[in-house]
Amino acid sequence: MKLIGRTLSPFVRRVAATLNFYGLEWEALPLSTVTDGAEIARHNPLGRVPALVLADGEVLVDSAAILDHLDSLAGPAALTPPAGAERRAVLRAVALGVGAAEKSVQAYYETQRRPEALRWAEGAEKLIEQARGGFAALEAMLEGGFLCLGRLTQADVTAVIALDFADKVLPALGEGRYRRLRALSARLNADPRVGGTRFAT
C-alpha cells in the first residue's frame, strides 16, 4: 500500500499511525498539496490528502474511509469497535478530535497561508476557539489513561495527532492548556508507531 501525503497533515498522520498499529506494510509518498497538486490529483480528483493506493491499484480517499477499510483488515485488533455502544463512544471522541484538527488546519491557513491583506482576524479567532472547544471536551473525557473504553482506541490516536498538529503550526492555540491530553501525547509518541510518524521538518 502507498500512503499519499505528508504527515504534517493530521489526517495523513492518523492513517500512518494506524497502519503501523495494525502491522501493515506501506510506503510513504510524501506529496504536498502546495507543490504536488497535479500528482495528488492523479490519485484523488479533489487534490486532497490522504489517499491510500491499495495493492491492486484501488485508491481510497479521506481518512475516515481509509480507516474504515484498515479496521476491516485488522479484525479484532481494530482501534474502532465494530458496532454498538462502544463504537458510538469511540466515534464521538474521534469526531471531536477530527473537528479540532479541521478547525486548527483552517485557522493555520487563515493566519499563515492566506495573503496578509486577505486575512480575517475575527474569523481566525472563531476557528481557534472552536478548536479549543474540541480539545477541551477531549481533555474532560480523559479521567483515566485513555479517552474511551479504558484502552487505546482510534480516539486517542486522532486526538493526540490533532493536538500535535496544533502545537506545531499554532503553538499559542494550546499553550498552557490540556495537561491530560499532553500526558497522553507523551505516552503515545514514545511508541515509535506513533512518534515515528511525526513530520520531520
Image (cartoon, helix red, strand yellow):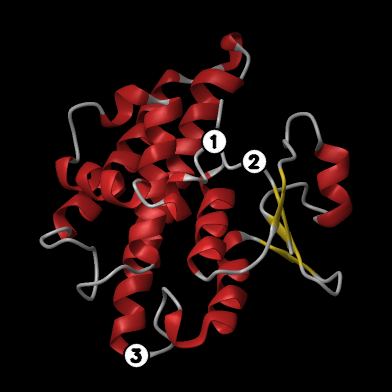
Q: Amino acid at mark 1?
A: Phe
Tell me the SS state at disc 3: helix
Q: Is residue 167 left or right of residue 59?
A: left
Q: Which mark is residue 199?
A: 1
Disc 1/disc 3 C-alpha distance (Å): 35 Å
Residue 116 at what x, y percent from top left?
57, 10
Q: Is residue 159 left or right of residue 49?
A: left
Q: Residue at x 36, y 27 (%)?
A: 125
Q: Which mark is residue 84?
A: 3
* Number of residues whose C-alpha sits closer than 10 Å to that of mark 3, classed few (under 14), some (14–19) or many (20 or more): few
Marks 3 and 2, the one that precedes in the sequence: 2
Tag 2 and tag 1, C-beta contact below 8 Å: yes
Q: Answer above or below: position of 186 versus 91.
A: above
Tag 3 and tag 2, C-beta contact below 8 Å: no
Tell me the SS state at disc 1: loop
Disc 2/disc 1 C-alpha distance (Å): 7 Å
Query: Which residue was labeled with disc 2?
Result: 6
Q: Residue at x 34, y 42 (%)?
A: 130
